Image: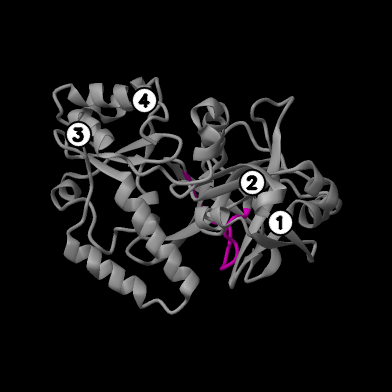
Amino acid sequence: MSIKMKPVPHNKYNNIKNNSICQIKINKNNGTGFFIEIPVPSKEFPIRGLMTNNHVINENILKSDKSFIIYKAEKAIEIKIKENLRFVFTSELLDVTFMELDDDIIDDIEPEFLYPSDKDAEDGESILIFQYAETKYSLAHGNIKYARSFNYYHEAPTASGSSGSPLLNTKSKVVGIHKSKKIENNDKECINIATKYTEIEFAIRKLYENSNLDGIEKARESAKELSDTEINKLNEYGLQPLKLSSDDIDEIINEINMIKEEDEKKIKLEELKILKKSLFYCKFSKRLLFYRTNFSWYITVVSEKKSKNNYFSKDEYNLNDVRKLKWIAITSNNEKIIKKIDNKIIGFGREHVLITWLGLTDLDYL
């Protein structure tokens, strides 16, 4: 079913362009950002801020406490990380960064905050993308082709610099955030990928509401380094860190070191460190793969062939490929997950215990 987009009134289009969308410049890299109001902890007391991709503003940039430049209606504005930001969330798996702005910077730059949709977009639904493709502002129309896991696969035209652009539905509500491309049909077709807004709000809400469990601090960075005691506890339940051979890791590092652009090189090396601490497999049910984020464990079922070949080749061992798997967030209520995976695995019930336990650990191992 195709849901058509109604024409956007010219004044509304200009208002979004000039007041809700911005270009982000980090060193030599460019991306798009947008201002959004998120109903966390509630609609009456929302958080308001700037959203973009994690690969545009990552945890290292946030830790630096430096500043970055945004261009709103072509006007340069300095955002000081230490002074202008309050609650900050970033996720390398979802490829999202949200930064709550303090009242002073909001009063200063006067953004018009977009509102999110409270439900996912449907297959075939029309979308608009407001973006700074190739550093120039543009508006693109397309459709959601299909959804899988926390991703939308869409057909709105994008280019370099579109990363972090909002996907707006027919009601001008945010349904997702554009992040990358994927080659399909034997390298004959290219399709764009976006993260679902609903998954982003799930993550932000969990960390924001767990401030007493260090959720606020956890939100700014990837999952923590686990102690030997914590690793041993995970082993007791059947989880083992997924590691490539030292030769494969050395080859990957050598390839990264050949990258000429220093910023890109740093990002790739940091992503490699994150993967090494975040991926786990199940010892007694080899088709189960797990990913540890700062807000939740995720699970996916891989093919028999993939599980027998150590899950990833050295060319596939990167965040872009990992993000494209069919991940499902593990929560305290996992009946749906168990139903989905029951006919694909043989763990003699032990996987039920593992998944239930992970759902109950909350932020303990994240």
Q: Residue at x 72, y 27 (%)?
A: 45
- Secondary structure, magenta segment, majority class: loop
Q: Which residues are magenta?
A: 151-165
How far is the residue under mark 3 from the one under mark 2?
36 Å
The residue identified by callout 1 is 79
Report the amino acid beneath label 2.
Met
Q: Quadrant of residue 304?
A: top left
Q: Earlier in the sequence, mark 2 or mark 4?
A: 2
Check the image and tell me how it is coloured.
Answer: one colour
Queried whether the magenta region covers residue 271, the answer comes back as no
Where is residue 124? Give x, y as percent.
54, 45
The residue identified by callout 2 is 99
Q: Residue at x 35, y 58 (%)?
A: 272
Q: Are marks 3 and 2 in contact (CB under 8 Å)?
A: no
Q: Earlier in the sequence, mark 4 or mark 3?
A: 3
The residue identified by callout 4 is 361
The residue identified by callout 3 is 235
Queried whether the magenta region covers residue 155, the answer comes back as yes
Q: Secondary structure at mark 3?
A: helix
Q: Is residue 301 left or right of residue 7?
A: left
Q: Is residue 45 left or right of residue 298?
A: right
In front of the other: 73 or 219: 219
Where is residue 132? Give x, y as percent.
66, 64
Q: Earlier in the sequence, mark 3 or mark 2?
A: 2
Where is residue 213? Give x, y as percent.
49, 27
